[in-house]
Image (cartoon, helix red, strand yellow):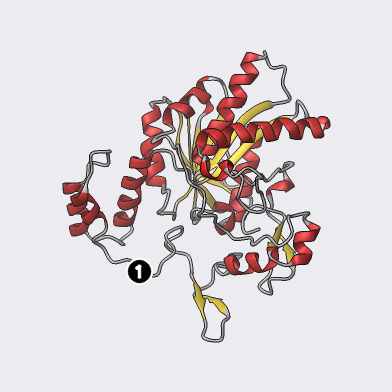
Amino acid sequence: MKELGPFRVNPDGKTLSRNKHAWNNVANVIFLESPAGVGFSYSMNSSDYSDVGDQITAEDTYVFLLNWFNRFPEYKGRDFYIAGESYGGHYVPQIATIVTFINHLFDGNTPFNLRGIFVGNPLLDEYKNGEGNLEFLWSHGVISDEVWGKILANCTFTSSDDWPCFVAAHSFQRVNIDRYNIYAPVCLHEQDGTFRSSGYLPGYDPCIDYYIPRYLNNPDVQKALHARADTNWSGCNLDLAWNDSPDSMVRTIKRLVENGLSVWIYSGDMDSICSLTATRYSVKDLNLTITHKWRPWYTPDNEVGGYVQQYEGGFTLASVRGAGHLVPSFQPKRSLVLLYSFLKGMLPPADIPK
């Protein structure tokens, strides 16, 4: 409701408006609340909350998709893609790996015609992400040269880093900026209990995180969505105990490329949390040969939408100019152009449209 869906919640927290750049303009979209306990999803088995992790989440997702295709058989065999963002850098490659393995095991005799994965601002490597986060903040003037020098002197960005690295990495002033887009306006709380944006960014409202819970906790809305009665919906569930999470997803992604899957990674270039800098480190670790060098790509209104580079096997890295961590929130039009190109299996436009 704040990114790629067909509706946005209005400031009154009661009504909706259409998102003209919703991704379902170009594809049928299934939104999956995963793992159990996220959003309106729940489990009757308490162990699903205490034993949760990457592996069980991938397995449960596969079971869900299998049952969904059985429930709606008319979609079996259609081109199928998996998309996600942020920690989706773990979720998406892992469920794609299960689907690919089982497709090979049964010689393609499954409902899944998996063609590719599309992952935005992903967490791909725990240590490279930490390094990329701090380097991004330094290169954008949030961290001084002196602090960056201390970080480089005390941090190796490996599992061997200890207290001196922690101190150095936390020695700069934390200010009221949105770490998910360091140039975006933030939501300000007024004394009368209302909210307002600190600035103006066309199509973006930083206070929408307050409108959505008000809307989704409306009993009439929950009834219309067939949600469990009296659910207290929130944007994050911090009660799940995560048990397994690989430090790096690079080898998993490389296997998917080697298995012929179309793998696109895109990155809003104003995000510090899972920065383009960090993503580039992991892409370099893939050790793939470049087939189409880094170049700008354009939107239909003659703007540079970002930059793109392609590698052997069709692996593609793209940036989205002016976007933060949640690319469809900050640059909905540009995200839709990139998605369309991904689905068509072609790089986004290299020239200004005539």
**Residue displayed at 42% across by 25% down:** 288
* Element type where label 1 sits in the image: loop
Nearer to me, 328 or 13: 13
**Residue displayed at 63% across by 42% down:** 45
Nearer to me, 291 or 212: 212
Q: Measured along the vertical axis of the image, is residue 173 above or below residue 326?
A: below
Residue 284: quadrant of the picture: top left
Q: Is residue 55 left or right of residue 111?
A: left
Q: Residues within 10 Å of mark 1 (few under 14, many from 20)?
A: few
**Residue displayed at 23% across by 39% down:** 160
Farthest residue, direction right: 74
Amino acid type for the residue under numbered disc 1 = Val
Q: Measured along the vertical axis of the image, is residue 200 above or below residue 31?
A: below
**Residue displayed at 57% across by 70% down:** 207
Q: Measured along the vertical axis of the image, is residue 323 above or below residue 248?
A: below
Residue 241 spot, x, y in % from top left: 48, 46
Residue 227 spot, x, y in % from top left: 74, 55
Nearer to me, 86 or 265: 86
Q: Measured along the vertical axis of the image, is residue 142 above or below residue 157?
A: below
Residue ID for mark 1? 175
Q: Is residue 65 visible?
A: yes
Q: Is residue 346 visible?
A: no
Residue 212 spot, x, y in % from top left: 64, 64
Residue 214 spot, x, y in % from top left: 66, 69
Name the quadrant of the N terminus.
Answer: bottom right
Q: Is residue 254 left or right of residue 12?
A: left
